[in-house]
Amino acid sequence: MKLKKLILAGLALLALGSCQKETEPFMMLSAKKVSVTADGGAVSFDLSANVYYRVLVDENWMSIVDKTDAGDVTTYNLTIAPNTETTPREGTIRFIGDGVTPLKFIISQAGVVPRGVNPSSIIVNPEATSAKFTVLGDKPWSASCANPDYKLSSQSGIGEMEVNVTFPANEEYTDKTTTIEVVIVGEKYTVSITQKALGKPQGILADWALGQIKESTTNYFVDSDLQTTPGTGNKYIPASTGSGKIEYYACERTPDYTIKAGYNCKRLVGSNGDPYVEGTIVGDYWLVTGEYVRNIPAGTAIDFYFVTKFGTYVSNYWLVEYLDGSAWKPALQTSTINESATISGATGLPLATPYSAQITYNVAGTLDNTGNGAYHAVQGKFTISAPMKSIKLRFKPMGRVGFKDGRYIDYISQSCQSRFSAQHISNPDGTPVKEYNEHVTLKFAE
Amino acid sequence: MKKSIILSIILIVALPFAAFAQSTLKGTVKDATGPVISAVILNQNNSKWATTDQNGNYTLEGVTKGDKLKVSCLGYSTRTIEWNGENPLTIIVEEQGFELNETVVIGYGAVKKKDLTGSVGVVNSNILEQQSKSQLSQSLQGAIPGLVVTRSSTMPGASASIQVRGVTTISDSSPLILVDGMAVNSIDNVASEDVEQITVLKDAASASIYGARAAAGVILITTKSAREGDVQIGYNGEVSVVKATELASYLTDPYNYMTMFNEYKWNDAGNPIGGDYQQYSQDYINNYKTSNALDPISYPDFDWKSNILKKQALRQSHNLTLTYGNKIIKSRASISYDKSDALYQGSNHERLMARVRNSINFAKNWSGSLDFSLKHAVKNDPQSDSPIKAANMYPSIYAGLYPDGRIAEGKTGSNTLAALLEGGNQINGNDYITGKASISWKPLEGFDLTASLTPTYSFTKQKDFIKTIPYYDAYDTDVLLGYVSGYTATGLTETRSDAKTMETQVIATYERTVANDHSINLMAGYEDYMYTFETMSASTNDMELRNYPYLDLANTNNLGVRGGSYQNAYRSFFGRLMYNYKGRYYMQLNARGDASSRFHKDYRWGFFPSASLGWVVTNESFMQNITPVNYLKLRGSIGSLGNERIGNYPYQSSINFNKAMMYDANGQSVMSQMTGAQINYAVRNITWETTYSWDIGLDAALFKNRLNLTADYYFKETRDMLLAAEIPTFTGFEAPDQNVGTMHTRGWEVSIGWKDNIGDFSYAISANLSDYRSVMGDLGGKMVINSDGTIIKEGEEYRAWYGYKSDGLWQTNPTGSDAVIIATTSAGDVKYVDLSGDAGTPDGKITATYDRTTLGSSLPHYVFGGTISLGWKNFSLSVLFNGVGKQTSLVTQDMVRPFMAQWLSAPGVLLNSNGTRDYWSTYNTEQQNMHVHYPRLSYTSAEKSNYEVSDYWLMNGAYFRFKNINLSYKVPQKALDKMGIKGLRVYFNADDPFCIDNYLKGWDPEAGPSTYIAKTFTLGVDLNF
């Protein structure tokens, strides 16, 4: 009987056992991904599995420090090392089990947030009027600049922000550096902005191709009739290259000049494009101005060149000078001469008081082989000692002895001519050269 | 339709079951030595029957004086006696020795074996039944001399190719196969269990009666039919375990793979010093095993073989037979089912076959028959590359599956295992239905007029469904990494084909013996045959759903349809005269005229006569006292046979339709237009290939019929062989077939057998051996170099090996003056012999044009087979063997070339069993390199030089195979009688259990690189009620 029961019980167990569903292999993670700060720290998760599995830690900055088993569940405790780099990083712990889908536990660790400014040094072109920098970090900050010309788009904030700085362009010929101070939770950071210096001026400042700008000279320079008002009369010759003008300044006529045939002063243009003036007397001058886009730095050397020819009844001694700061200075080496006259140009009679004067000059006229004034070049170089917005060159008669006959210039006539000439300089033997290609030029010396 | 057919069959089988009762006869059946067990005594008058018990005793009821009793027993000559009232009655039966009285089916008739004058081979059902083969073709190996059965696989559904007396023509040398007179396209359309006898008509005299299709011989299969007195229900069931005979070994393990791969790369890099580790670092290799243990995902060690191949597959078969016969009706119905699984998933072959044979004597002088057979077979295969190759050759460092069973990437997307599991399938279904209705009239004694109608229908259904196979990240099942190579789109192709034939036949025979000495048999007949084939298929690709293999969800933007049809027909008249005088002198004359639709009507008819003579020497008076020789017949035959299997419309030119770019009607713009163009140059007067042959032979029985011997020598010449003639390519036509070639085949066959018994112990042994040599004659200047490394060339054996002659391996780097195929040839590469050059002498170069030569026969020679049968009481043991005595086989590159596709594993034969290299290596000593068998590891040399067809790769493919071992036990009848069981036999079969060969290690000499030959172990039962 016992045996029968035993057999029945055994069969029942067998039946029960055979009814039980075979356990499916499994492997599961409580979480598949976790994020940690740059500081790292401890992480834990659970893995449930009923199969043999392998654990692979792919990165050395994380490590399993402990695990505890509870049935099919294993709790893994990890230590994550601080991330000293700014870039975030990701690491995996892989679980490869027999007969189940392998699993990855992914740890994403943030990178260190950088604190400071970026960039800390900015170099901009002289024309630039703005620059940007970024305040880095995740903390409050303030920014300031001692130079009031430098304006900041934000003077304070929290966390990373881009700051725009505006400033005037650098018109100097030296680098200009300004520092912006940024304070992030008590730590000072600086951003230096360097505006690069202007480049040395070069090339032509102003040039007048006289033979080619006759029309322009006619329009802007020629007087319609005799002028009696002192000054330039708003007449000028614009530069054909660069920026500038040639003016003729007439001084006030004094009674000691006889106005011959009512002749006072008249600006004219010759058939070859020469601007000239009838009625040039001492006190008048030609003013050549070259305008530059910005200040011309001190120390800049200027080459000048023009061709002139004197009328028969103007001074033979002229002075070419330039404006340096507020002072006119000779543009060429000067000389002095004592001149005198005893015959009046106006009357042809002896002067009541003979004329005599010592004059300083740096240009003297010459005659050509026809007995007229020869075409000769006036050229040289000068250096300004103060920054100038424009270059001014003045060319003026200095004596009152007639160029051709040596009489005292005490009247104003048509023969009192002076000019800038387009005609080629005369040959050394005095013969004229019938070419009309001369320029008036102001040029930055190399 | 199907239902009515089945109902008819049941009625035909069931109607005649009725019985009559009479008085009781008792007695014993004996042979010369004692009682005969399990003999059947049939009363032919009332169909009652009885069987003998262990003591040979029987009890038969319902016997009336004058009844005819037929006594039959396996292994004994059937005897019919008229009961004279003697009771008890002892009946003496004679043991069959040489089965001279055995009836052999020949063309359009049957004769006793002793009356044969032609060369005919016979296999009876016992040889077939003892083998557990699904396919009948596989069972015939070694059974008949001259019948060459070649197989490359025994995978489910695989057929073997059959040739009778070797090669007859280069077009199609497969024999004509007729089952109960119905031509079938495959011998495997018949279940082995249904076969009564297979007759092979080998010579012209035997086969020419089938003229048109008999050039390559004829195989006549006679299925079992009911005999008068049969009342039986039989069941045969088998369960088999199938294993591969051999599976090749490859060096797939990580260490060998990686180290050899490094060497392979290093060799091609020129062996730079310190560059040994070209692909895998030393640390990587050395630590791989440890790495794998820790991380099998990143460092796989995947066993492709065990994942792809099963250790064994199963096969089962069942056959149920109902047999009944009386004077009026004889009916036999059988149904067979078998299913075989392959050694890998998704491949199997399932077959259901039914066969019914009915005959009825429905009036005096009138009889009829109605036969029907059905075969339904389905072959399933995975949509993958060869699983066998993948199992063998995939390196284990690539994973086919993740640990959870999901598809892994394999080797950068190559993953045959994935294809096997998820790549879709190919289904090939075939339904084959045959029927035969005949009616016979016998108005005169010896005269018979029979008309028959034989329709056959064949339906095939193919479904090719290929699916996308995505593979995902190992850890993240949602992250798609890509698709397995070749499986990036889901596509479906469905093909339906049907073929139907209709054969009409009228045959008249007249048989008479004149003056007791002159036996005459006349036969004349008419036959016509019509074959129609039609097919259609539809395909689609980029289907949206990957698990819906039906075209109603076809991608309408990607559709393809195809179709085709053809017909052919024959009309034939034939006749035969058989005459013998006193059983001594035999003569047979055959003639057949055939017309085939495959030829132009002016060249359609072919006439194929044949004649044979036989002289039974032992029937001469001078032989009567020579007792050891019981029977001796000398035979000779001559005749012609025809072949026209060269396509359906060879004499007609045909037009191919295609879209072509044409100018429009204005000649302005180019557009795509459907156009037709003649593509072949037809030869109008193309006609029959004719095979002329002669045969001499002898049949002998000696020593009380215990030793029998048959020998034949034959010659056949095929003339007017149809070959594609060379024509200038500028014609734009493909080469047309012309009657230009000749071919000669000369061969011999011997079979010998001994059969005897000593008391309860009986034994028999038989063996056969045959050989032939087929040599090409004039081929009209044509020479064919085949892609398998053989050549068809005048004066050479058919398909002789053709390639380079080798001279071992280079042991040092060749110099500039040495003849090589490629300039980069190095020490360790195969060294070829410079045979000739354009001037007719060696030119210092190895070129395909001048340095290839014939390298010997590729065909099997000295094909043999045999049986050994032992019997003791109710036990019997039988062994079948077969083999090939001489064959030169070319090993394929898959077998010997390392790193096929530049990543698969190296064959295991490259290492010796002790692990040393059997290939030339820089790491070997000079002495070792002198003795290695395989060239160095190299891609460059392998691709262009080392594995060219050459005698270096020709191996001895001869083998001796135990084809079948059958051990059976017949349960004593006494024990069964109480249960009403007529017979019970249980048996164990081992098919293809052993093979002795000298072939490449790991390779079965019959198997191909993508297949296997299986050894099958079967438990079976035969049960008869």
Image (cartoon, coloured by chain):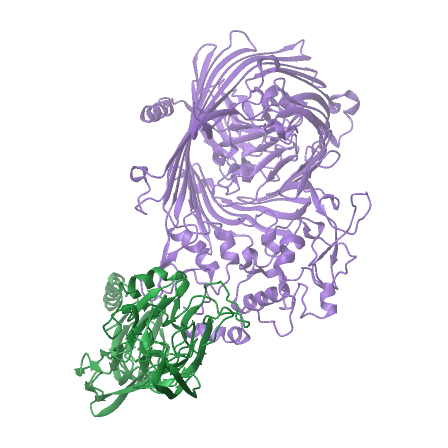
Chain colours: A green, B purple
In this view, the residue in front, B58 or B888, is: B888
In this view, A302 is above or below A434? below
Describe residue A433's horizontal placement relative to residue B691 as left or right: left
Please state the total of marks drawn on the protein image.
Answer: 0
Residue B75's image quarter?
top right
Q: Position of residue A54 (x, y in %)?
A: 37, 75
Q: Is residue B836 visible?
A: yes
In this view, A7 is above or below B839? below
Q: Which quadrant, please, contains the N terminus of chain B?
A: top left
Q: Position of residue B977 (x, y in %)?
A: 42, 38
Residue A268's image quarter?
bottom left
In this view, the residue in front, B1022 or B797, is: B797
Describe residue B535's horizontal placement relative to residue B727 as left or right: left
Q: Position of residue B652 (x, y in %)?
A: 56, 20
In this view, A434 is above or below B688? below
Q: Residue furthest front?
A: A349
In this view, the residue in front, B308 or B949, is: B949
Q: Residue furthest top?
A: B443
Q: Which quadrant, please, contains the C terminus of chain B?
A: top left
Q: Position of residue A167 (x, y in %)?
A: 24, 80
In this view, the residue in front, B579 or A351, is: A351
In this view, A46 is above or below B78? below
Q: Is residue A81 visible?
A: no
Describe residue B638's horizontal placement relative to residue B293 as left or right: right
